[in-house]
Image (cartoon, rainbow, N blue to C red):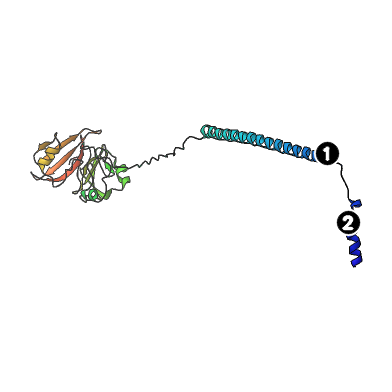
Amino acid sequence: MDDLDDDLRRLFNDDRLDVHSEPAAVDAVLSGARRRRRRRTAVTGAVAVVALVGAGVGLTRLDSLRSEDTTGAMLTTSVSSPPPLVPSTSTYVSTVTKTVNAPPPGNGEGPGEPTSNRSSSPPPPEPAPGRYGTLALGMSEAEALETGSLIEPTTPVDADKRCKTYATKSVPDADAVIVSSAKGIVRITMPSYAKTPKNIGAGSAVSEVKAAYANAEQTGSGVTVKMAASPPWFYYFESDGTTVTTVHLRLTGGDCSS
């Protein structure tokens, strides 16, 4: 082993094995190395310049794009911004219809309804002139019987039997209604509780009759009030001198004794 080490050591120390380079070769190698370093430096600088230029251009373009984007966004916002919404308002009209009974005309052209009915319910429409309930002055006997308001049997008023008398469901007197064979009903007696449209009835003072009807005419104890109607008729208020006791509706020109 020692001999091998000695041989190797002598071999490496032998000057004949050394490689001697020429001075010109050394210079050439050094020159080549310097040229390569210059080229690398130039390339590196150029790359750096290009990179810097590219970065500047990129930044400039980026700023431009950002500016354009911002401007575009601003323009878009200002142009396409919708107008403020106005809340819609709906109007409802509610219509209420109320029916009110018409007030009585107060012209004294027909008797009113019973006071008890007026106090318990709205007043009914005014009766037709010369009418009480379903019966009317001038109505024929047949028509009056069809109403069902007359109570039979009848009582003749005169010997010729031209006129007949009937009681009614509201007035039990035998002569409550007088019917002429020629002119129909000539007299209707109102119930004691009934009132005329001017609130006159049995129990009213004679002075109240005259105050309610300006054309009232007193003859004895009775008071006559003519009505402007067709056929013509009148109220006849029987009294005891101061107070009304009975109210009749009479046909003007009747041919039956009353």
Report whether residue 60 is seen: yes
Q: Residue at x 51, y 33 (%)?
A: 78
Report whether residue 161 is seen: no
Q: Specify which label sits upstream in the sequence, 1 or 2.
A: 2
Q: Is residue 178 left or right of residue 73?
A: left
Q: Quadrant of residue 93?
A: top left
Along the line of sight, the residue nearer the viewer: 13 or 130: 13
Give the distance between the C-alpha atoms of the residues marked 1 and 2, in whole angstroms: 28 Å
Helix, strand or loop for disc 1: helix
Mark 2 = which residue? 12
Amino acid at pointer 2: Phe
Mark 1 = which residue? 28
Q: Residue at x 92, y 66 (%)?
A: 3
Give coordinates of residue 143: x percent, y percent: 31, 42
Q: Callout 2: few (<14), some (14-19), or many (20+) C-alpha neighbours within 10 Å?
A: few
Along the line of sight, the residue nearer the viewer: 196 or 42: 42
